[in-house]
Image: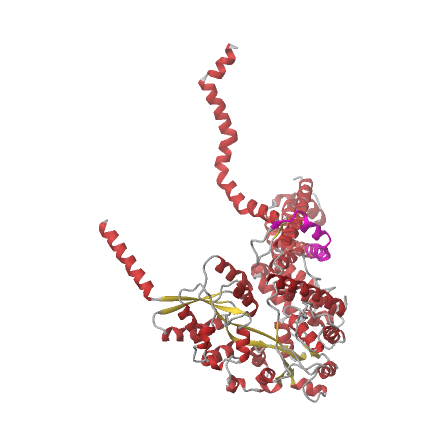
Amino acid sequence: MITRKHIVTEPGGHRARRSLYWQYAVEPFFYLSPAIILIGAVMLMPLVIGISYSFQSIDLLRPFNTGWVGFENYTKLWSDRKFWLALENTFWWTFWSITLQFFLGLGLALLLNTQFYGKKLFQALVFLPWAVPTFLSALTWAWLFNPVIGPIPHWLAALGVLSEPYNILGDPDLALWGPITANVWFGVPFFAITLLAALQSIPGDMYEAAEIDGASAWQTFTKITLPFLAPMIAITVMLRTIWIANFADLIFVMTGGGPASSTQIVSSYIFTTAFRKLDFGYASAIAVALLGILMVYAVLLLVLRKKLVKV
Amino acid sequence: MRHLFKSIGLAATLMASSAYADTTLKLVEVITSPSRTETLQALVNDYEAANDGVTVEIISLPWGQAFEKLATMVAGGDVPDVVEMPDSWLALYAGSDQLASLEEHIAGWDHGDTLTQKTLDMARQSGDAYMIPYGFYLRAMFYNKKLLAEAGVEGPPATMAEFMEASKMVSALPGKSGYCLRGGPGGTNGWIMMAAVMNGTNEFFTEDGKSRLNEPGSVEGIQFLLDMYQNGYAPRDSVNWGFNEIVAGFYSGTCAFLDQDPDALIAISERMPAEDFAVIPMPTGPSGKAFPTIGFAGWSVFKSTEHENDAWNLVAALSTPDANATWSKHVGVIPIHEGADQDPHFQTEQFKGWFDELNGAQYEPTIMPTYLEQWGYFGSTMVIETAQEALLGQRSAQDLADEWAGFLTKEHAKWKAAQ
């Protein structure tokens, strides 16, 4: 009793407890507060506002005529044929863009990691598309696919891929391949640069040891190169997937989502709903759906990365 | 310290008095290009030279974001004195009581008498004259003389049936097509025009507010364009063509007909010899009439301006016959004053088509119902998407017409209820 009383009333002990509280519960957040405020203001607030929009009716021309509508936008979304079509297109657009970009980028990185004559010039040329503004590359590719001015349809016809030189951007079955081609051209340098950097960080003695042990080229690649590249591959593929799934610039300039919505992806559908139909509530609901899908994807990939990367 | 205060005070007084003496007008242009701004600046320089003490500040908003930007400026209190006003926004700004009526100014203006009736009709669309149009974007038919001769077509078509026949004959030539169909961005005018010409009227709604777009005649008009495409009289990829593609399709000699505004003439005459093409009015339908769409833009004065007279003087200076001729030649529009067709620039075989259309009784220009709130969405997104589905054979003309008419009827009811 006396002891307890002693502890409670002893001024030093009281101060010690207070400083413990200060040290662990307040002080760290106090130092972090600029970052927390910044993140809250530029990321969380807009996110929360955006999500709240999806439960409202918002009309740009009458900004004060808003109101909460509950899950109305989401029920509408569930039965919206165009949304599901856009979702399917988003999948194919992202899948082919990322697959082709990745494998071509990996090939280029492996090539650039060797020594050959004129490497510097070649390297500069490979990285050039990354520096071209998307609007310009979309416009250029759109015209390259135009049989009146561009050569591609004539080449494809000469190779027997097309029955006659026509513009695939006008064919609903093939139109998505136009923006995908432009996207691959535009995005290969990104993979080439990042994978080349990762390749160059692999210690050379690993390869020397493998050579002494008599490993084949394939074994060296699968047992040394790939495991070392894996963390970089996982993170770049995840970032690029999210980016490409949201990336409507090329599609917008090259086909405008057409013909007949055959190249409409979810993010371009969000744009038309928000800025043409001026229906911000419904556009927000679509955006939230896309956000949810991408988050699930990101979590899956992060789990996968944890399992894969054992080095 | 006292010295400092004194000099600050003196400077402030000087600045205030000079601001009081000089007037600065803010002019916002919304359809811009560097060379266009240069032409506007030259006209404004003339105005400034003639009006001592008035300076004009030109603000150029890129067209893609102009709507939102101007709306934000106005809502935020940064209201310009004079603005370039496209037809599709006039109802919105005039309806919300933002614009000054120019009726009295026009009545007292030296050049008010020579404004054509059409100009005044367009200016008064929302009641009073809330703008002075600077010119018209009117549809007429370009045709390639060489291609028609090669295909054995005797003369340019005057009726829709002749138009279809001539397109068919041209399409028989290897690698050539009859019509530069605009299936992509901006294609709405084509569908509306064809529906109107076959239906024999360009009224959008019946008296009880029902859209006329799914009347049998209109459906026939929609079917006309579908036939054009599906029979191969238009290039296969024209389902996605916008302005640049149709114009390139015409000047490259891929297709023989193109219906466009005079602004297409700028690109075409740069690349095609004048003797190889000409412009005729739009072909007429079974009723003997044609309904080419007409668009316009002009200059408006905001009601909130503190210098209404100076602002009007600026609009008047931009709209004199001389200034308007310079402007319309550069921008590619039909000028607004009577007698403008006597200018040698407009007396070519190319411009004849437009002036014939403006003066002929069988041609009734069609103004789009831009007063409908969702018209922008209808024209720029809904029509394009659904029409492409029909062009590709995924749905019928009737189906298309019913969907469009249903949407417009609903929008019209909404508009009516708000009146």
Of the pair B356 and A205, the residue shown nearer to us: B356
Q: Residue at horizontal 57%, vertical 57%?
A: A62
Of the pair B404 and B236, the residue shown nearer to us: B404
Q: Does B195 appear above or below A107?
A: below
Quarter of the figure with residue B286: bottom right
Tell me residue A172's x, y (percent): 73, 65
Tell me residue A36's x, y (percent): 52, 40
Quarter of the figure with residue A83: bottom right
Of the pair A141 and B92, the residue shown nearer to us: B92
Q: Does B235 appear above or below A309?
A: below
Q: Which residues are magenta?
A: A67-95
Residue A102 can be seen, yes or no: yes
Tell me residue B81's x, y (percent): 44, 66
Residue A90 forms part of the magenta stretch: yes
- In this view, the residue farthest toward the bottom is B154
Side of A265 where B99 appears, left or right: left
- In this view, the residue farthest toward the top is A2
Q: Does B133 appear above or below B306?
A: below
What colour-coding does the image apply? secondary structure
Q: Residue at horizontal 31%, vertical 60%?
A: B16
Quadrant where the image shows the C terminus of chain A: top right
Residue A109 can be seen, yes or no: no
Of the pair A59 and A244, the residue shown nearer to us: A59
- Main secondary structure along the magenta-highlighted residues: helix
Total marks placed: 0
